[in-house]
Image: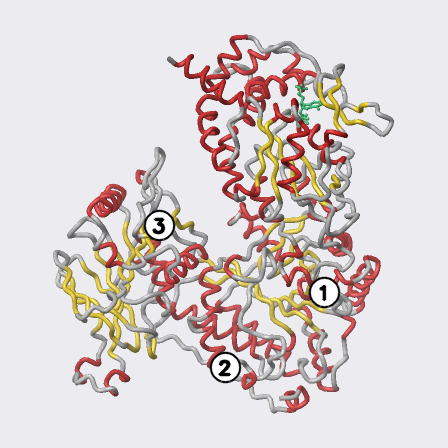
Amino acid sequence: MSPSSIVTQKANPPVPHIRCLTDPALHNPEVQAPGRHKADERLQLSHRALLISESPNSSFGRKIKNFVNSLRIQVKVASKSKALPVLTNKKSARFAVVIFENYLSYLKLDNWNRQLIDKYCRDYHVGIVGFIKPPKGGKDDVIYLDGYHLTLQYKLTLEDYKLNFDSYLWRVVKPGELWEGFLPGKWTVFHSNHSTYQNLAFSKLSSRFFEFGSGETNNLKGFKFVTSIMDKGEIDGIPKILFGSDLSFWLHTVMMMDALSYLSFGKLELKLERYIQIDVDDIFVGKEGIRMKVEDVEALVETQDRVQKDVPGFQFNLGYSGGFYLSGNNEEDKGDRKLLEYRKKFRWFSHMWRHEQPHKFPTDFIESSMLMNKDFAKENDITVYGEYSVAPHHSGVYPVHEPLYRLWKEIWGVKVTSTEEYPKLMPAWQRRGFVHSGIMVLPRQTCGLFTTTIFSSDYPGGLEALDAAIQGGDTFQTILTTPISIFMTHLSNYGNDRLALYMLESIVSFIKCWTNLKLLSLPPVELGFKYFEMFPQDKEPLWTNPCEYYRHKDLWPVNKTCDGLPDFIVVGPQKTGTTALYSFLSQHPSILSNKPSPQTYEEIQFFNSHNYFRGLDWYLDFFPQREKPNRTLLFEKSANYFDSEVVPKRIATLLPRVKIIVLLMNPAKRALSWFHHMRYHNDPTALNSTFREVVTASGDAPSKLKNLRNRCLQPGLYSQHLVRWLDYFPSKQIHIVHSDELKNDPVQVMDSLQKFLNVQPHRNYAQHLRYDPKKGFYCSVMSDGQTKCLGQSKGHKYPAMDAESERYLRLYYRKHNINLSKLLASFDSELPEWLKYELKQADLLKS
Ligand SMILES: Nc1ncnc2c1ncn2[C@@H]1O[C@H](COP(=O)(O)OS(=O)(=O)O)[C@@H](OP(=O)(O)O)[C@H]1O
């Protein structure tokens, strides 16, 4: 259909038609089963689920995991054929619910695992959720589960669905409705004859089944088939909730939420409140023919009034671009004026004057665009909610374009925005918020509307497809699993067939009929606070590389380079010779180091400190342009990356293929060097204490001393830190340099490093490094033949370690050194002499 024929089509907006069968007020979970979700403090259950999947790559297993993860519940996946994970630790029972992708696999578990699981479930009152998958190639369509008083009947084709109104399981689900229609896939139904069972849901044999001649009689057509059942645990002490199918049928996701909540005593549940915000973007933008007319504006106001009854506080947020005011046809211009007449009814937020994408324009242009839009509001007496704004096509929000954030704050006082792009568009359930530069960025969701679709007949798949998304499909699932949903709609969705109004009223009704979710709305800033109160862990961003994802690359200003990030990083730890290595590497003609920082000299210290929150642009500014793009390698070294909890994850997220260089030396000697480094830099606690006092500080020693001890000794727990790096990087991406070798034979170290880095040309460091007897270290040979050594603070003289500290630290690091010796095997690294010596001496001390 050509655009012109679209706009001449007669508008006949569809009317929302969802009505509840039962009075929505009838089912009230709090009243029906008081207190049943109260967690029992005694139980000490972790907020996690254990999923036993059929195989590591089973697609249904993945689907269950993703669904449970979408509720922000962590899932540990174990394969049925592998050993079970540890179920308890000192502090708690690790899983609040056990889920079996195939319940029959639970019944067939080998004795050992079965006893383990059952004992765990009984001891901690942990329940099981199970899905029934008929055995492959099984001849029997009916199986009696011995000892369970339960018969399973497989492979049925069913239609229509209703829930047991009287079950006390329901929390999110409101059980009074009837779902009419064919149910996807083949089903297992349950026949029970024991008081332990409570039927949860019922269905009917599908009429299709009769058409194909089963020989059954019509009396089977009623709601006789139990499709989901609860076992209260009277027989074996373990409560269970079983589903006769997978999660393809929409209602099963809601029932699954209730099952998780019920069986975990409320540990695994989301609250019932669901906040929704609807932004109407592109106000005044839009070609002639797709804009709003007077009656569309009236409909907008009327719908808002109606929705407010079900969603307290609801108000449309209108994002305007004043540059396009009165740019439609006659009728539409009247619509624009009407909208201004009703301006006080809505919450207005500013867009750009003519919808410009900030990352594509110079900063002063963006500034004047914002100012013109601000003037437009003033001239037309529009009260703008300046704390909220969004950018056209997510431009500048993520990946972050710093000028946009700055101008938003300066011109509008923006405090909150939203985007679909962080960390990336898909999968939608993984979208998150973050805070940058004082602005809260909230995740935005999609609600099944397209900017270009203005008539229901154009909707892909027809109105039925939009209905399907609302009635249990994607739009419903989004609200179900997302406590705060911000939906972006467009002006075009409110003219012509007004599909956005249809969608909104329909979804509100559907949620009201089928769930106990409480729909609410708040102004954007309050919503932002609410979001980060719910998910404080989201505040810190996790920067990704804009050039690694096509959508982000499109939003990355063209003048920003895609090859400005480091190829390798020297991560420390401190005092292991990192400065010498940095200086040797920088001499290589194809290796460029970062530019110095005024605060931290040769180190950038981005990933481990508050610098990380300055953003990617700040980091990128430290790297010079590559001289020969395909040959030059960029690197940085920051010696306190090694032992930081957060750094490996942050580096791996931004630079998944970066090479990592770690230096290791005797941790006791490293501690001594660090102590003297602190004295050299006039640390008062170090100056007023002996090394022995520092390393042995414990119990009632002054907290400053204990703090110093921690900072002194903790980086030397090498194995513990290396394991964390190995969580994020394969061992072949990590190169270990032994500090003693760097000190005594740097030429050899540089040879093997060059191979690891695959850098060309190969530099013969024998010609460029020479031992300087005065300094006592290797130094660089300058063009005039003189040596240039590192400054005074590196390689300075201090007393040797006292015997008591040596003994103390030998035992202190013993366990970690043993672990390190095992770990080094995965790096193909020989055990350094110090490690062999230390382990031997420690053994002697022990014996
Ligand atoms: N060639 C060369 N020149 C000078 N110093 C050398 C060299 N090779 C290794 N070392 C050892 O490096 C130790 C300092 O380590 P770092 O540079 O990692 O220290 S820092 O973390 O950056 O402060 C420093 O430790 P101290 O001797 O305790 O000062 C040196 O032992």
Which amino acid does the dot numbered 2 rest on?
A: Gly
- What residue is at 32 percent from the left and 73 percent from the top? 185
The kind of secondary structure element at disc 3 is: strand
Q: Which residue is mark 3?
A: 78
* Residue 607 in which image quadrant: top right
- Quarter-of-image position of residue 750: top right
Rendering quarter of residue 251: bottom left
Answer with mark 3 or mark 1, whichever residue precedes in sequence. 3
From this view, report whether residue 203 is shown above or below residue 715.
Answer: below
**Residue at (63%, 19%) from the top-left corner?**
673
Q: Is residue 36 visible?
A: no
Q: Quadrant of ligand 1?
A: top right
Instruction: Look at the image and tell me in which quarter the C terminus lies.
Output: top left
Image x and y of residue 812, in percent: 47, 19
Residue 104 location, x and y as percent?
A: 24, 59
Q: Residues within 10 Å of mark 2 (few under 14, many from 20)?
A: few
The nearer-to-camera label among 2 and 3 is 3
Q: Is residue 483 above or below residue 601?
A: below
Q: Which residue is mark 1?
A: 351
Q: CA distance from mark 2 to mark 3?
A: 39 Å
**What residue did someone put label 2 on?**
461
Q: Amino acid at mark 1?
A: His
The residue closer to the viewer here, 556 or 539, is 556
Give the position of the N terminus as an image quadrant: bottom right
- Tell me if I can see residue 17 in this picture: yes
**How far apart are labels 2 and 1 at the CA level?**
32 Å
First of labels 2, 3 by sequence position: 3
